[in-house]
Image (cartoon, rainbow, N blue to C red):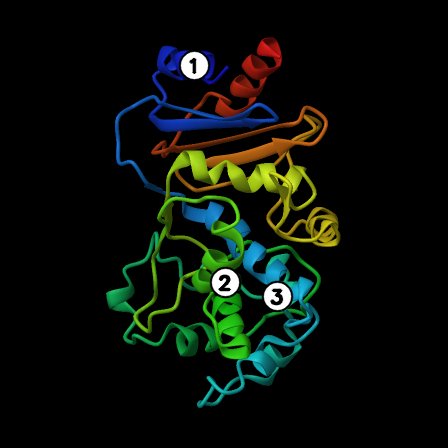
Amino acid sequence: MVEALRDLILSHGWNIYSIALATDAGIESAVCVPGNKANEGYSTAKLFTNTAVAVLWDRGKIDLDAPLTQLLKDEIDFSCDPRWDRVTVRNALSHKMGVDRGVLDIDVHDTNTIGTDDFLRYMLAYPPVEAPGGTFRYTDVAHYLVSRAVAAHCGKKIDEILREYVFSKMDFRPVAFRCCPKGYPMGATGMYMETADMVKLPWLYINGGVYQGKRVVSEAWIDICERERFDWTPLGDTGYRGKGGMLGQNMLGSRKDRVALAWHAYIPRCEEDITGLLLEKLAELK
């Protein structure tokens, strides 16, 4: 089936490097436009960060309703607006922290111009403008703060957690993480991996947290992720959920159709509904 999807991609001239498909029969992948073997997934990284939190939550090591500043207390050696004390891990994962958008987006902003190499101090200098838990405002700040909070509270960075508890169980090949100047994964972006590995995450989620018979995260976590839309959101009425990146990357899956799909790309703008057309082709093939 993946070869037919590749042919569709080539016929439209979409700049998709590689595509991968996961079904009960296994994982298929194909190169469309030659590129790097492992590529940047941009905001698809957020669902991986959420999965690191899932590992801790399943083991009772993190409370979703804990304030971020409480988890970060040993890292905050500077004055911090008390409004931050109301922002929880749950608020961050659901993008409902009450902050303005775009405080720091490392894929867009030149971080050499912000005047500091301390991203935590920089981000916490912009307090919430409204009560947490209300308005959805998508921002990379959320997952960087979660990345720092996890490391401060649990003593392991999110990349270490993912490698030990997720990637090792799911036979991932090497994965690289873009880090801040202090050495912490950005959490919101900056993960480099092969497409045939990226597709394993949506496959895990549509299988209730089990990969090839191995429990990786709990089904209770998957339920929370779906209910509260922790970067695993429905795609209209297609029956699919997914998580995309800013330059055309995507990973998605359907419990009903028992299929997951992922691709890496560089597509700044496209008038065509790439996802919709790929899902139409997939439906024809099944």
Question: For the residues marked 3 and 2, what is the alpha-carbon distance in whole angstroms?
Answer: 9 Å
Q: Quadrant of residue 282?
A: top right
Q: Which residue is mark 1?
A: 3
Which numbered disc flags the more N-terminal residue, 3 or 2? Answer: 3
Residue found 50% across the figure and 69% down from its top: 145
Question: For the residues marked 1 and 3, what is the alpha-carbon distance in whole angstroms?
Answer: 38 Å
Residue 212 vertical position relative to residue 131 in the rendered view, above or below = above
At mark 2, the secondary structure is helix
Q: Amino acid at mark 2?
A: Ile
Which numbered disc flags the more N-terminal residue, 1 or 2? Answer: 1
Residue 251 vertical position relative to residue 139 in the rendered view, above or below = above
Q: Position of residue 101 (x, y in %)?
A: 50, 59
Question: For the residues marked 1 and 2, what is the alpha-carbon distance in whole angstroms?
Answer: 34 Å
Whether residues under marks 3 and 2 lie with C-beta atoms below 8 angstroms apart, the answer is: yes
Residue found 61% across the figure and 51% down from its top: 216
Q: Which residue is mark 3?
A: 56
Q: Which residue is mark 2?
A: 161
